[in-house]
Image (spheres, rainbow, N blue to C red):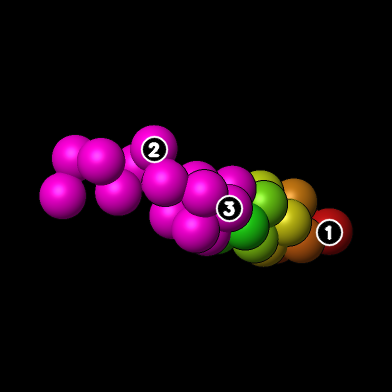
């Protein structure tokens, strides 16, 4: 399960989730 973080699929998923969290966080104050 540790290798999942280094796989392309999970890596892209983590980045996509991080971007969504940032966008939502920036949207709340606005």
14, 27: nearer the viewer: 14
Q: Quadrant of residue 10?
A: bottom left
Can residue 25 be spotted in the picture? no
- Disc 1/disc 2 C-alpha distance (Å): 35 Å
- Disc 2/disc 3 C-alpha distance (Å): 10 Å
* Disc 2: which residue: 6
Name the secondary structure under disc 1: loop
* Disc 1: which residue: 30
Looking at the rendering, the stretch of residues picked out in magenta corresponds to 1-15
Is label 1 in contact with label 3 (beta carbons under 8 Å)?
no
24 within the magenta span: no
28, 21: nearer the viewer: 21
- Disc 1/disc 3 C-alpha distance (Å): 27 Å
Name the secondary structure under disc 3: helix
Residue at image position (15%, 49%) is 1
* Quadrant location, the C terminus: bottom right
Dominant secondary structure (helix, strand or loop) of the stretch shown in magenta: helix
Residue 19: x and y, percent?
A: 67, 52
* Mark closest to the chain's N terminus, 1 or 2: 2
Give neighbour class at mark 2: few <14, some 14-19, many 20+ (Cα, 10 Å).
few
Report the side of 4 relative to 29 (left or right). Answer: left
Residue 12: x and y, percent?
A: 58, 53
* Disc 3: which residue: 12
Residue at the limit of the structure toward the left, as seen here: 1
10, 26: nearer the viewer: 10
Residue at image position (52%, 49%) is 8
């Amino acid at each position: 399960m540790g290798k999942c973080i280094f796989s392309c699929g999970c890596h892209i998923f983590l980045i996509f989730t991080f971007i969504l969290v940032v966008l939502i966080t920036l949207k709340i104050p606005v």
